[in-house]
Image (cartoon, rainbow, N blue to C red):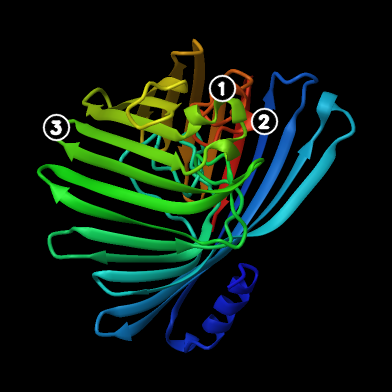
Amino acid sequence: MRRPLLPALLLAAVLRLPLAAAAIDLRSQLSAWFSLNDAKPSTPRLGLRWQPSLSLALPLGDGWKLDGEFSAAAEAEIVAPGWDVPAADGAIDPYRLWLRLSSPRFEARLGLQQINFGSATVFRPLMWFDRVDARDPLKLTSGVYGLLLRYTARGDSSLWLWGLYGNVEPKGWETLATAARTPEFGGRLQVPVPSGEAAATVHFRRVTGPAGETGESRFALDGKWDVGVGLWFEGAFTRLADPSPAGVPAAGAALRWQRSLALGVDYTFGLGNGLYVLAEQFLADSAPSPAARGRYGATLTALLLRYPLGLLDTLSTIVYLDWRARRIYAFAAWQRTLDRWQFHAMAFANPRRAAAPGGPPAAGAGAGLPAASSILAGWGFQVMAVWSI
């Protein structure tokens, strides 16, 4: 099935439903922001985003239910290099477009959806299908087209299976495009363990690069425990069947295996209204074999602090330390939440170019930090207002 046909097929399926018996919920979110950093020439950015959303739920009896979400994202941005001659750009795209058949222990979800899992919070080796940035107050990310099956057994063990199609552009940590007209597929087994849970995940796809097409396989383990403090780990291996499409022919063998590991801990201290502290360590590199010494890589540490000033206001900060490049990424934010409004004021002090743990330094800006945005490059600030109805 070609991806452009999926929205029309899902719409046709919805129109055939007995909508009079369905619970329908209409929502909308409007956000506006202004940002400025130390780019030369000085370049202010003004943006507007509107996300209308329709959700429906239709009970089918015997514990079964059919539900879905249909939302779009309309965005416009005005950029004025040197505060002169502003240029406007915009786009309207589907954001979520899925139908789900579910019971208390099973679900099948088809369409444009968000698929995420894992135990890590900031540096996520299992960020395979989304690009959620811990610094983004709205946690926005593109979805993927596919089918997700999930079964939860008695005792809370769960099995996930998925098949994706039509998601050519790189997603998550990917730097190589998925080969056109080829499916991706994978699965995840998650089981309870004393004081927590652990899981194993696999994924397979075909990728394309300057030297042609090759296979890529991934394997990951993760776990999370609550032992007074929260503890977690998340580790992933990515293997290229032929490393040459990675774009660095001379170092192809060194790029055959991509390895990443995140270790984390969090705790809420009983200070004032409660100070939440999270620390996470991230290691990533490339090597010719799983146990060989890596040639390229990154070593990063994250420290996140969050403190509620009261019922309405929250202060937070995230600091990333890049030990290999000896660079610091700093971010601080204030948030006020009212009935239907959120207001955000954010300041940042970052390098102009992010680290690249999965390959050589020229592999691409932004690869070292989750969904690194050009808006957060350098020094600057951003203010945002969000209205939800």
Residue designated by label 1: 348
Q: Relative to 13, is 79 above or below? A: above
Looking at the picture, how far across and down is residue 11, in whole percent?
58, 78
Mark pair 1, 3: CA separation:
32 Å
Looking at the picture, how far across and down is residue 332, in whole percent?
49, 24
Can residue 298 be seen by looking at this rendering?
A: yes
Q: Relative to 360, is 80 above or below? A: below
Q: Quick one: label 1, few (<14), some, or many (20+) residues within 10 Å?
A: many
- For this orientation, the residue located farthest to the right is 85
Q: Relative to 76, is 317 above or below? A: above
Q: Residue at x 47, y 89 (%)?
A: 18
Q: Nearer the viewer, residue 73 or 175?
A: 175
Quadrant in which the N terminus appears: bottom right
Task: Determine which of the numbered discs, if any, sits on residue 35 in the image.
Answer: 2
Can residue 274 be seen by looking at this rendering?
A: no
User: Quick one: label 2 or label 3, which is nearer the N terminus?
Assistant: 2
Dot 3 amino acid type:
Gly
Rendered image quadrant of residue 5: bottom right
Residue designated by label 3: 228
